[in-house]
Amino acid sequence: MQNNGQSLLLHRENYEVPKGQEQSVHCKVAKLDENGNFYEKPRLLHFGVKSFDTMDKVNLEAMGYSVEILYHPNGRYTNVRITSREEDLAAKDAEIARLKQELAEATKPEVKVGRPKKEA
């Protein structure tokens, strides 16, 4: 287990595995409070595959850490991601804006095209 000096704004989608370290599990570990704010700066850690799958991930989560797997040699744990409170709020704001737009389009009055009917 070692810490790397890379930027910890990394996620699975933009993480590049350093050459020669393709056989270890790379993960970002952070401790969050109940509001989603970081207690401490997230750390990039490397583990052996066997120890990570059997003990390390479970132990870290039992100690209250959130674990985001950036790279796993066997392709496991693909949907786990740590997000900060700001990222969560930005995503929810975008969803609210999308829903408001859909609602505005759905409640827009329909305009009928054609000639008005003549009354007798």
Image (cartoon, helix red, strand yellow):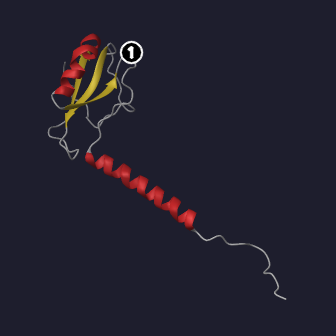
Residue drawn at (28%, 38%) of the image: 9
How packed is label 1: few (under 14 Cα within 10 Å), some, or many (20 or more)? few
Residue furthest to the top: 50
* Residue reaching furthest to the front: 120
Is residue 3 among the parts visible in the rendering? no
Percent of width and height locating residue 111: 68, 72
Residue 73 visible: yes
Residue at the image position 40 percent from the left and 19 percent from the top: 75
Residue at coordinates 21% horizontally, 47% vertically from top-left? 35
88 left or right of 55 in image: right
User: Mark 1 highlights which residue?
Assistant: 74
Q: Amino acid at mark 1?
A: Asn
Pinpoint residue 65: horizontal percent, then vertical percent. 19, 31
Vertical side of 51 occupied by 111: above or below = below
Name the one closer to the observer, 3 or 120: 120
Secondary structure category for the residue under label 1? loop
